[in-house]
Image: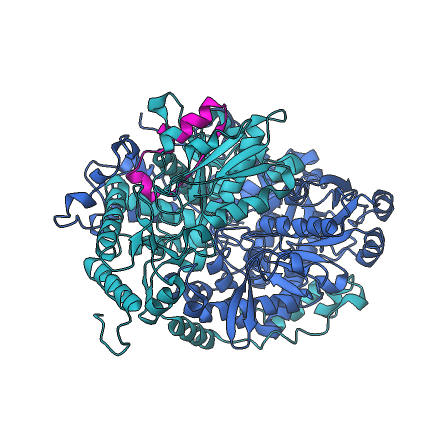
């Protein structure tokens, strides 16, 4: 029997010990009328060889593409060692480190993670992760409203330059909490959040600031932070963690203008060594100022000492959590995304500041190279003038059909923005990371040119 | 037993502490084979200097500088300071720590699958969508429900989705007076926390002496303000809720809905379908019942399933089959959906692992899960009683788990459930869940799962018997456990007081 070791002899001796005539007797407390007959629609079992063949065939039929899609999930090089270590059984098949003495591997790794991500964001403390970037933002908004207290306005500004799926997730998560989410627009020329338009809003609990924003454009984070702090609103930064090897950390936003930096920073951890993998499992991270830590959701690891005075690590501040506080908890969250976080920690340890900066810089440079190359193509135009990290929006004729033609050339050419931002007309969001070389960029530009200018299908493309 | 206790044997081989990665750092080191090559004479316009200076990082980044080998050794050594299913028996009640077949991992990590972008068009990943669709169909069959969404990323998020759907259902009918969710006092903490996140007030219903919901109390509690009841069955007390049909006859006529918490679904997989027990909506924990790895605390996956009247509120996205083509259902297809729960499609790779597992088990294999999980639990329960342990519910059959209470032992010897749990670590066994459920004093919640052999169970019984003996003859040894782990008992009060949550250079 797959994964069940019992022989008939084992079963018989165990039943004899129990004093039951058969296994069915063990279910005698279930009312007979509820017992189910069959699982007709579940297929018969497969052995490992057959399922391996099926999965391999499906994976191969989907095939591989040269990928210029970003939009919140990014293709980066992942050192081979990262997942080889992360999928060691001792990490992979362990559970939540409730028995700390038997879980020092996981706990110390999480403590190292918290230290690394707090340094990246420039904030005091971090939790041990949340589900993903979008749900982490939802949690951050709920947290900010808790921090402001019952008498404060339950109103949060959410820029339209934020990932549309993040905005949708926030809406689901705060639906029942009587929080007013106000969308703020962007400047058509620069692609940045329109700071002057913010002035129309009073009595705000928090302002969400993405960096870079969904369009790949760098927001004027200092001005936005100063604006919020002038009005006693908290600032929730939504950041790409890899970009922070290059960009100013949220903890320092606005400090030259007298503001005190973002109060909470969240983001999608996927760029740190987690494969694209169809969207998950990724992990969300959350960092905040020390004084807000008791309102932070999720697991937190702290250092302590053991009975002999040796350093060790435990889950701490559990009085915030659902298994203690029940309906008064900071969140219903129970898990963190431990395995993905383990991978990210190994990734950051291997690359260090220099390696991460190199990856971030190379991604930025590749985008510049791509933009230079494609803007020479007739009909292709960069939409926004604001400085970009590694993504940009392009206007081009017939976005959908163009992307379909690129797909026929085994290129994922970008994301069609029409369903999300109809106001931009025919537009796509395109991304280049350090994984692309000059040849890839040339191939993209060449195929894009062909797609737009009707070169015969039979004509050969460079491969 | 030999003259030397496991602690004494192991004490000589205790692993030394591993320094923090930051303490291994040396300036200039790094896994340089992994670095993106410096661009060859990139035009100045491309460089970071083209970015506005005020947006750039000036502060040092406190990341370690270590060689690839040093990093690899460090994290390998850390892994060795963990208990895990792959190395230890792990009878952690309520968590279903069964074997995680390696094929599930390797097949979910095929290179093409890892490279798939979550926003790639459906045409580019029909194979993956087929797996998810088939998983949805299998989950519909085992739950007896009409629709499934794989979107929730953990059990607690599945609960959130399910309770949000209950809220949406009542609101769609204009029934805004239903502001209460009822949960049993033995429920997991996520239940009341979820109800609160969904804007409900929480009422706790008591449990009777046999571990069932107190029907009289429930009857008195339901009314036009009742939005629903959240129930785990078998309950967190390790027994099947025998009056489930009566509960249904109390809650539904009052206009409330029934939520099934699938935490203990492993106990009834293939035996009973929640949809046929009268539940309207439920979640599953794929990291329990469908054996995806727990990963040191996640990622999990918590698909939500609903009957006909609630399915239109399912969270996005959902996969559908349209002739031979698979596609996502979106906001336009499901306008009443409670919406998105994540940026993309949930914990997609976890879903693939569960799919592989489900296919390997197949119909017959799924029905065997509950059989052998229950056989193992009842065997352990009976043998531990013979060994002198007190059961919380001696008159009941165990489901896939059961509760031992050490209250009497504590009174006799001063040894607590915590001490007992720590001492088990010295015997090379992960402790059961302790102090949950809150209703039973000094409790151990023990769940062996179906993948353990009776030899392993016998070794566990011997260890339990040995510790019971130690508690009576040398209580101090148990109270000061563990002795063999890389660190001794840790000071949790100091951790909460110091709040040392991140490393800082001295």
Q: Is residue A190 left or right of residue A29?
A: left
Q: How many marks?
A: 0
Which chain comes out cyan in the rendered image?
A
Give the position of the C terminus of chain B as an image quadrant. top left
B352, above or below A255, in the image = below
A362, above or below A64, in the image = above
Q: Which of the 4 image quarters holds residue A411?
A: bottom left
Image spot of residue A422 (x, y percent): 46, 53
Q: Which residue in the rendered view is the most extreme toward the left?
A: B41
A331 drawn magenta: no
Q: Which residue is more in the foreground, A444 or B134?
A: A444
Q: Specify the segment rendered in magenta.
A: A224-253
Please say whether residue A436 is visible from this viewpoint. Answer: yes
What residue sits 41% from the left and 31% below the top?
A: A224
Q: Is residue A396 left or right of residue A166?
A: left
Please say whether residue B379 is visible from this viewpoint. Answer: no
Image spot of residue B258 (x, y percent): 75, 54
Q: Which of the 4 image quarters holds residue A78?
A: bottom left
Q: Which residue is more in the foreground, B454 or B475?
A: B454
Q: Which residue is more in the foreground, A364 or B368?
A: A364
Colour used to depict chain B in the structure image = blue
Image spot of residue A68 (x, y percent): 32, 58
B28, above or below A378, in the image = above
Image spot of residue A269 (x, y percent): 40, 46
Q: Which residue in the rendered view is the most extreme toward the top?
A: A258
Q: Is residue B89 left or right of residue B400?
A: left
A58, above or below B430, in the image = below
């Amino acid at each position: 029997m797959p994964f069940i070791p019992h022989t008939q002899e084992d079963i018989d001796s165990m039943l004899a010990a129990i004093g039951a005539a058969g296994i069915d007797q063990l279910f005698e407390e279930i009312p007979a009328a509820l017992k189910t007959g069959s699982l007709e629609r579940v297929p018969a079992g497969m052995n490992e060889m057959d399922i391996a063949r099926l999965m391999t065939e499906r994976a191969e039929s989907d095939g591989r593409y040269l990928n210029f899609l970003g939009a919140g999930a990014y293709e980066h090089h992942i050192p081979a060692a990262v997942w080889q270590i992360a999928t060691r059984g001792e990490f992979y098949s362990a559970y939540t480190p409730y028995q700390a003495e038997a879980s020092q591997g996981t706990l110390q790794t999480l403590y190292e993670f918290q230290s690394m991500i707090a340094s990246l964001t420039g904030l005091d403390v971090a939790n041990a992760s949340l589900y993903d970037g979008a749900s982490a933002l939802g949690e951050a908004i709920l947290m900010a409203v808790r921090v402001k207290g019952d008498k404060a306005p339950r109103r949060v500004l959410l820029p339209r330059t934020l990932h549309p799926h993040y905005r949708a997730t926030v809406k689901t998560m705060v639906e029942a909490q009587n929080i007013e989410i106000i969308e703020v627009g962007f400047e058509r020329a620069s692609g940045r959040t329109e700071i002057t338009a913010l002035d129309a809003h009073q009595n705000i609990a928090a302002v969400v600031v993405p960096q870079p924003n969904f369009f790949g454009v760098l927001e004027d984070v200092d001005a936005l932070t100063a604006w919020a702090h002038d009005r006693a609103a908290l600032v929730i930064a939504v950041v790409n963690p890899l970009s922070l090897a290059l960009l100013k950390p949220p903890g320092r936003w606005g400090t030259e203008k007298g503001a005190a930096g973002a109060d909470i920073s969240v983001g999608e951890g996927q760029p740190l060594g987690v494969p694209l993998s169809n969207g998950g499992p990724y992990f969300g991270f959350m960092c905040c100022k020390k004084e807000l830590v008791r309102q932070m959701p999720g697991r937190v690891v702290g250092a302590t000492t053991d009975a002999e005075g040796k350093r060790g690590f435990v889950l701490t501040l559990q009085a915030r959590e659902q298994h203690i506080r029940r309906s008064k908890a900071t969140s219903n969250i129970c898990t963190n995304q431990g395995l993905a976080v383990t991978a990210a920690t190994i990734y950051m340890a291997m690359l260090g500041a220099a390696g991460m900066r190199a990856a971030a810089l190379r991604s930025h440079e590749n985008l510049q190279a791509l933009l230079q190359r494609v803007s020479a193509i007739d009909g292709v135009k960069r939409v926004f003038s604001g400085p970009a990290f590694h993504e940009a929006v392009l206007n081009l004729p017939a976005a959908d059909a163009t992307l379909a033609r690129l797909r026929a050339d085994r290129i994922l050419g970008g994301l069609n923005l029409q369903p999300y931002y109809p106001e931009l007309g025919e537009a796509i969001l395109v991304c280049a990371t350090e994984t692309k070389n000059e040849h890839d960029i040339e191939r993209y530009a060449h195929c894009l040119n062909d797609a737009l200018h009707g070169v015969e299908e039979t004509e050969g493309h460079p491969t | 037993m030999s003259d030397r206790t496991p602690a004494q044997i192991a004490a000589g081989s205790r692993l030394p502490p591993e320094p923090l990665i930051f303490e291994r750092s040396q300036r200039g080191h790094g896994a340089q084979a992994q670095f993106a090559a410096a661009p060859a004479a990139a035009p100045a316009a491309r460089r970071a200097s083209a970015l506005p200076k005020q947006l750039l990082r000036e502060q040092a980044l406190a990341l370690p500088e270590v060689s690839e080998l040093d990093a690899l050794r460090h994290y390998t050594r850390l892994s060795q300071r963990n208990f895990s299913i792959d190395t230890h028996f792990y009878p952690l009640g309520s968590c279903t720590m069964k074997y995680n077949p390696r094929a599930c991992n390797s097949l979910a990590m095929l290179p093409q699958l890892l490279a798939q972008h979550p926003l790639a068009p459906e045409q580019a990943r029909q194979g993956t969508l087929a797996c998810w669709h088939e998983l949805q169909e299998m989950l519909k069959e085992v739950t007896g429900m009409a629709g499934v969404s794989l979107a929730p990323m953990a059990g607690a998020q599945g609960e959130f989705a399910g309770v949000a759907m209950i809220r949406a259902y009542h609101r769609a009918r204009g029934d805004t007076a239903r502001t209460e969710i009822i949960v049993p006092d033995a429920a997991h903490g996520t239940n009341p926390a979820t109800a609160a996140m969904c804007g409900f007030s929480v009422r706790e219903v008591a449990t009777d002496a046999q571990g069932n919901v107190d029907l009289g109390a429930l009857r008195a509690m339901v009314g036009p303000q009742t939005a629903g009841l959240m129930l785990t069955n078998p309950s967190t007390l390790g027994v099947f809720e025998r009056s489930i049909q009566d509960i249904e006859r109390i809650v539904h006529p009052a206009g409330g809905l029934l939520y099934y918490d699938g935490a203990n679904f492993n106990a009834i997989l293939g035996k009973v379908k929640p949809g046929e027990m009268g539940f309207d909506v439920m979640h599953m924990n794929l990291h329990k019942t469908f054996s995806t790895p727990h990963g040191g605390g996640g990622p999990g996956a918590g698909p939500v399933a609903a009957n006909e009247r609630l399915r239109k509120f399912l969270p996005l996205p959902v996969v559908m089959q349209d002739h031979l083509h698979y596609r996502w259902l979106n906001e336009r297809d499901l306008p009443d959906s409670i919406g998105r729960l994540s940026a993309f499609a949930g914990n997609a790779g976890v879903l693939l692992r569960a799919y592989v597992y489900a296919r390997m088990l197949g119909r017959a294999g799924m029905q065997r899960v509950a059989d052998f999980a229950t056989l193992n639990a009842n065997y352990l329960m009976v043998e531990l009683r013979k060994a002198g342990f007190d059961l919380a519910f001696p008159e009941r059959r165990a489901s896939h788990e059961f509760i031992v209470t050490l209250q009497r032992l504590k009174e006799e010897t001063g040894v607590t459930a915590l001490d007992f749990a720590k001492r088990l670590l010295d015997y090379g066994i992960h402790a059961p869940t302790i102090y949950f459920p809150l209703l039973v004093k000094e409790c151990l919640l023990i769940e062996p799962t179906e993948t353990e052999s009776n030899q392993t169970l016998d070794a566990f019984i011997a260890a339990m018997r040995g510790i019971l003996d130690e508690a009576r003859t040398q209580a101090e040894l148990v109270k000061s456990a563990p002795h063999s782990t890389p660190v001794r008992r840790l000071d949790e009060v100091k951790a909460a007081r110091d709040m040392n949550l991140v490393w800082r250079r001295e």
